[in-house]
Image (spheres, helix red, strand yellow):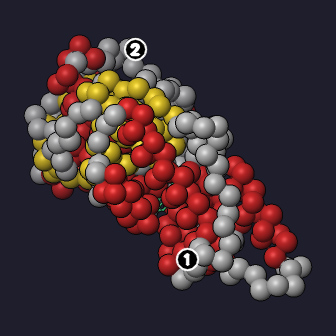
Amino acid sequence: MLVLGLETSCDDTAAAVLQDGNKLLSNIINDQTSIHSKYGGIVPELAGRSHIDQLHKVIGQSLESAQVELREIDLIAVTVGPGLIGSLLVGVNAAKGISYGLGIPLIGVNHLEGHLLAIFLQKQIEFPFISLVVSGGHTDLYRVDDFGKYKILGRTRDDAAGESFDKVAKMLGHKYPGGPIIEKMSKEGSSNTHKFPRAYLEKGSLDFSFSGLKTSVKTYISKRQNMNTETLSDNDIAAGFQDAVVEVLSKKIIMACEKECLTRVVVTGGVAANGVLRKAVALACDRSGFKSWFPDPVFCTDNAAMIACAGYQKFMSFPESKADLLNLDATASLHLD
Ligand code: KG4
Ligand code: ZN
């Protein structure tokens, strides 16, 4: 079974061809970093226009690289939300057009389900497990009982973890996206000299909050010029900030496992590309006797392979979820549970 996955929810125009759920034939991503980086964040209008410009090329490249003709595709899986509405509509309308024109079945995929199931591109994980989806827009902890069976255990009450990486990088004068820059800077810095605050919220809570940490970094940077004592370098700030985020994420994952009596963990989403987070979670899980998995970094950040994978699983588990062409629509705000 050949699935064409399409992803245009934010600033990546992506198409992938997946065979039988886990044999990836192509995975093409056109990222818009060069368009948005000078603005310090994503400009929705520019994102939508670039998707219109790029999507047909990216689809063509994905078919060519997979050596597959469009008429050979058995199912089209497209992201329907959450995301930027102008961006989502480009993918949804393209998918509808191809589906209608060639009579190919179509399925709508929640972007978060795509992230959550990305690991199945590489490994069949036994249910149930705990999943942390940590990206630029979300920091969500789920209990996953099966394909399509997700229970939210905690989520951020303010900024997403990825968003806080982007904002701290911007405060330090760097361009969007900030996550990879902070990770690189932190390798040259020390997190030991100053401890930025960790928000654990009320006892037992599995929710997150990163806005206090962000403000604390901002305050430190603005006071730094006037300090008489030795101050932190930009690299130390990056390392200290990253440490605070990683510590909270790792601890809440372990708390979620203990609360739900589960021993398997999957961490996914753009921030899960972070090597320090991967190491810290793997170590914390090892210490508690839990197992952890992380998709390869290319499947952590936005891509269409994960959308094809989630679409395939959804279609196999619930064939009736095949979309009615006229009803399929994009939704900017969409939950998973
Ligand atoms: O999953 P993703 O590509 O898009 C969303 O669905 O949001 O995640 C993008 C986010 C950005 O905030 C980016 O700064 C962050 O993931 N990110 C990272 C790293 N790579 C990407 N954060 C920390 N360390 C990284 N290596
Ligand atoms: Zn994403």
Residue 110 in the image: above or below residue 117: above
Image quadrant assignment for residue 323: top left
Residue 158 in the image: above or below residue 287: above
Residue 12 placement, left or right of 165: left
Q: Residue at x 33, y 46 (%)?
A: 266
Q: Residue at x 62, y 65 (%)?
A: 241
Q: Earlier in the sequence, mark 2 or mark 1?
A: 1
Quadrant containing the N terminus is: top left
Image quadrant assignment for residue 111: top left
Q: Amino acid at mark 1?
A: Met
Q: Position of residue 330 (x, y in %)?
A: 47, 26
Image quadrant assignment for residue 158: top right
Residue 8 in the image: above or below residue 292: above
Residue 15 placement, left or right of 209: left
Q: Residue at x 41, y 26 (%)?
A: 151
Q: Residues within 10 Å of mark 1 (few under 14, many from 20)?
A: some
Q: Residues within 10 Å of mark 2 (few under 14, many from 20)?
A: few
Q: Position of residue 253 (x, y in %)?
A: 43, 45
Q: Which residue is mark 2?
A: 327
Return the residue nearer the eye: 135 or 280. 280
